[in-house]
Image: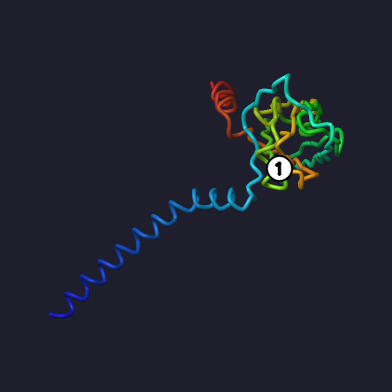
Amino acid sequence: MTAPKSNKKLIYWLAFGSIAMFGFGFALVPLYDVMCKQLGINGKTNTIAKSYDQQQVVDKTRTINVEFVAQTAPGMSWDFGPTINQIKVHPGELVHTVFFANNTSNTRMIAQAIPSVSPGQAAIYFHKTECFCFTQQPLEPNTKADLPLVFFVDPELPESITTLTLSYTLYDITGKTLGAALEKAQGAS
């Protein structure tokens, strides 16, 4: 009689363990986001344009060094980068700069830039009012484009942070867009 009872107990614990593991796996993403936010290591910037108040107070007593870094994902045949590697800005000042892109392939491609700010705790103080990262970037074969970036650093940026690094990675999303699917469907008919 102890064998069926122990089997029921074993099945109960196995089912409980499976459900607990599923729940833990499901909770990992939000837990990771919370942990990164608390530790200041997430580096995520705004993904939609932030409006700039023309009455914004510019803190001329502080200078922040903003560095620009760019790379393409492996296998992507584009030249991509900033036109300047760094710029000195005052918190609250609206800054205009440009990145360049050159599709060196023989096919039309669509790219998406993913930004990151370092140190991570500074990401909430870095605001983009216009950015090529907000939209997909289609380029015809052997075509160049200027990609505008307009941003400001919030005057509330902690004084201990004097350098920000804005990094972009450019990904080929040609086959992953609705436009590509429609073009493919039209080409087949």
Q: How many marks?
A: 1
In terms of depth relative to the viewer, which is nearer, 107 or 170?
A: 170
Seen at 69% across and 35% down, the residue is: 113
Q: Residue 89 appears at what percent x and percent y?
A: 83, 33
Horizontal arrangement in the rendering, residue 10 relative to residue 154 (left or right): left
Evaluate whether residue 1 shows in this view. yes
Q: Can you give x and y, in whole percent of width and height, for residue 24 in the image?
A: 42, 57
Q: Is residue 14 above or below residue 37?
A: below
Outermost residue to the bottom: 2
Identify the image's colour scheme: rainbow, by chain, secondary structure or one colour: rainbow
The quadrant in which the N terminus is found is bottom left
For image coordinates 69% across by 39% down, the residue present is 115
Label 1: state its secondary structure. Answer: strand
Residue type pointed to by label 1: Val
Residue 187, position as x, y percentages in the image: 58, 23
Q: Residue 143: in sight, yes or no?
A: no
Judge by depth and name the residue closer to the eye, 173 or 133. 133
Answer with left or right where residue 37 lies relative to residue 64: left
Farthest residue to the left: give it: 1
Residue 108, percent across and down? 70, 28
Q: Residue at x 39, y 56 (%)?
A: 22
Determine the residue positioned at 67% across, 30% down.
110
Query: Camera-side residue: 2 or 60?
Result: 60
Which quadrant of the view contains residue 114? top right
Category of crowding for the residue at label 1, using alpha-carbon neighbours closer than 10 angstroms: few (below 14), some (14–19), many (at least 20): many
Give the left or right position of residue 19, taking residue 123 as reference.
left
Q: Which residue is mark 1?
A: 117
